[in-house]
Image (cartoon, rainbow, N blue to C red):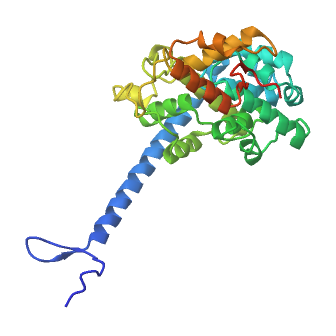
Amino acid sequence: MTDTHAPSHGRRNAHDGAIVDTHADTHADTHAVTHATAASDAAAVSRARACRAPLTAWWDASARDFPWRFGRTTPWGVLLSEVMSQQTPMARVLPFWTAWMDRWPTPAALADATPAEVITAWGSLGYPRRALRLRECAIQVRDRYDGDLPRTYDELVALPGVGDYTASAVLSFAFGRRVAVIDTNIRRVLQRAMRGVESLGGSTTAADRRLAQACLPDDASASVVWNEAVMELGAVACTASSPACADCPVADICAFRAAGYPGLGQRRTRPRQRFAGTDRQVRGIVLNALRQAGPGAVLPYATVRGLWKDRAQLDACLASLDDDGLIVIGVDHGVRLPEG
């Protein structure tokens, strides 16, 4: 009698009763997938090598001239630019970055600022928790590293507000290290130009990391230029929905263009939420009113109520701002920016 709970090592052919070895099928399928992946990686790396010279020449001639580029700022200035540029166009970041570097040119200088000062200086950049995280980062750099940014990946990602992308960008752009930098623009260019497929967004995958590492030049200095140039190409030419192939230095090499732009504009993630009427808008209105009120000012709740007609939404946003450490709600429900 056969044990019905025993593991099956094959399947019975329905026509002749013969046992078919499913392990052989599985091994064959796995081998085929591995072989196909290796072939795809090899083709992608070959295209990347062909792209290096024209892309470097394009970068040298056409890169936008931001003050945090070309070795003209400190590592702290690079980190500040990267944090400010998260979900914010670089052109919009420029005046804020300049003002911050003039006012707080070092981590030690920013560490001495009050939360109210940094929130006010953040202005309309959006996602204002970044300002508080930068201040917390500056305090740690001052207290743990004598005011100098650490030079290892593990130390950088341990700082408040610094994730994988920012740590890698600082190592590459500030310290000249050979490290793959992966942001949305770089992923899009690599997937399109090297693999011939659309980048669907979402979180960075193991395949994204493998491709970025494989395409990276061996020379450290060349790898920095590669990271910068690929990122720039994705920002100004190989954009998400309307790639400007006529302006692209690697259009003749691009696998995506050669394939006829398959799936152009498709996304794995949901469409971007509208801004009007959202909690983000309400939170921004409250913070802007506090900035305009000036240092130390307290807005009475009656004044705050006049900022937004939906009282329930307003109260929820005030509570979330308080939870995030961006405002302080008094016993009389008046609000102010945090001072310490």
* Residue depicted at x 50% and y 20%: 278
Check the picture and name the quadrant holding the C terminus. top right
Q: Is residue 264 above or below residue 168?
A: above
Residue 29: name its quadrant. Answer: bottom left
Question: Residue 93: where, in percent of width, then height?
Answer: 68, 16
Question: Residue 251: where, in percent of width, then height?
Answer: 46, 22
Between residue 316 and residue 20, name the one nearer to us: 316
As drawn, the residue found furthest toward the bottom would be 1
* Residue depicted at x 65% and y 41%: 164
Between residue 299 and residue 226, name the one nearer to us: 299
As drawn, the residue found furthest toward the left would be 15
Question: Residue 84: where, in percent of width, then height?
Answer: 68, 24
- 171 horizontally vs 52: left or right: right
Check the picture and name the quadrant holding the N terminus. bottom left
Q: Is residue 195 above or below residue 80?
A: below
Q: Is residue 68 above or below residue 2?
A: above
Does the image show residue 62? no
Between residue 59 and residue 280, name the one nearer to us: 280
Does the image show residue 106? yes
* Residue depicted at x 40% and y 29%: 256
Q: Is residue 23 above or below residue 98?
A: below
- 271 horizontally vs 59: left or right: left
